[in-house]
Amino acid sequence: MIKIIQCVLLVIAFSTPSFSVIGIGGFPSKVKSVVTDSQSGSGAYVSPAGGLRITEPTRLVGTTFNGTVFDENFWSTHTVNGATANVVGGEVLLTLSGTANSSAGVHTQRIARFVITNPNAFRSIIKFSSITIATGSNDRRWGLTTDDENDQIFFSHNDDICYIGYTKGGVETLISTNSLNGKYTGNCDDGLYHKYSIIYTPLTIQWFADNVIVHTIKATTDMLVGTFDFKASAHNENTDGEDGAHTLNVKALAISRLGQMTTNSTFKHIDTAGSYNLKFGGGMLHNIVANESGTAGTSFVVYNSTYAETGTEIAMIDTYKTSLLNAAYHLPFNNLFVVGTGTFGDITIVYE
């Protein structure tokens, strides 16, 4: 005799992400599954065709710190009034001097380009301790910034108080710990390493500490920042006469895209001498194709800039006796500008 045993599947829950599975009977006719993030409450996306959307992070900017020398190909530093920014033991020490109003900072050379369909994620590992302010103010800040610092999203330890904040057009908004709407209850200035993250889209910014949500802000009638193309940065600064030798330890800084590296490309066909702005804003230069050769003494120059005289030169192509050249670059740029002189031939540029 065959005995049929009825069984019920229990709810199985995990933390970040969490799963729920419900079934009835030994051979369940219906199975419902839900995948959510226990911190933000966001659910997984299933397309109308039944496919589960998978997001793979792609690192855009940020590398490890090695040895005792900054790799200036990837990082830029600045120091004022005797402060120092040194690589020691695989981390950056931003140490202020005993001179009033000293400062030290580090940021990525390149910008992390934002693609409207995918969030970007800033990630860092930071350590610092509580301090005593002698005569002025101290601000230790890490997160996202533009070169002119008019737009930022950041964590901050300002005058021995922890904040999160953002800046738009030079106008700064600070949110203190007693106004946060997240679940984090830790202490940022305990002298221990902590992992800090910021996930941002045009409509929502979320701050996380040690994988626990700190705060969420959603844009309503206006955007929270003026751009979403940022550099990863950390900064330690004394102001108003403060002269304490305060330190900020930076173990890691990086920005990733939560999605694929590339989007569909476009192209520009150029066969007439002149200057051309191909893109205002960040992108990827994929290929330069020389369809026809040019005459002697002519050139075709590609710049990472909106104007040739102020930009970084990516390539100078001698098209004389060169045709059917397909040069693959796959390089990020901040802006794309080209200059063709004389009868340089026939060029097609593929980029995004």
Image: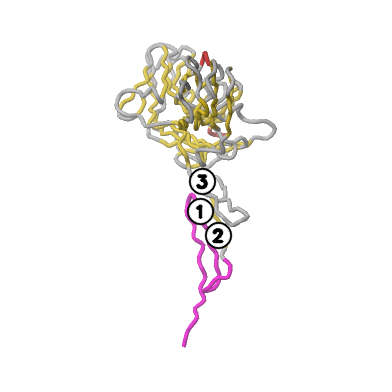
**Which quadrant of the structure image shows residue 192?**
top left
In this picture, is 173 found above or below 205? above
For marks 1 and 2, the one nearer the N-term is: 1
- Magenta residues span 1-30
- Residue that label 1 marks: 18
Residue 304 pos. (x, y %)? 50, 22
Structural crowding at the residue carrying mark 2, measured as other residues with C-alpha within 10 Å and reported as few (<14), some (14–19) or many (≥20): few
How much space separates mark 3 and mark 1, taking CA atoms?
Answer: 17 Å
SS at mark 3 in the image: loop
Residue under label 3, please give it.
Answer: 55
Q: Kindly identify which numbered label has been placed on residue 33.
A: 2
Mark found first going from the N terminus, 3 or 1: 1
Residue 160 visible, this orientation:
no
The location of residue 172, given as percent across then percent down, is 58, 23
Kindly check if marks 1 and 2 are in contact, taking CB atoms under 8 A apart as contact: no
Which residue is rendered at x = 50% and y = 65% of the image?
10
Viewer-proximal residue, 156 or 159? 156
Q: Which kind of residue does numbered mark 3 sit on?
A: Thr
Tell me if residue 3 comes above or below residue 259 in the rendering.
Answer: below
- Which residue lies at the image location 58% right of the left edge and 70% below the top edge? 29
- Amino acid carrying label 2: it is Ser
For marks 2 and 3 on the same chain, the one whose residue lies earlier in the sequence: 2
As for residue 267 lying within the magenta part, the answer is no
Q: CA distance from mark 2 to mark 3?
A: 19 Å
- Rendered image coloring scheme: secondary structure
Kindly state the secondary structure of the residue where label 1 is placed.
Answer: strand
Q: Is residue 14 magenta?
A: yes
Pair 1/2: label in front: 2
Q: Amino acid at mark 1?
A: Ser
Whether residue 119 appears in this view of the structure is yes
In-front residue for pair 111/300: 300
x%, y% of residue 208?
50, 38
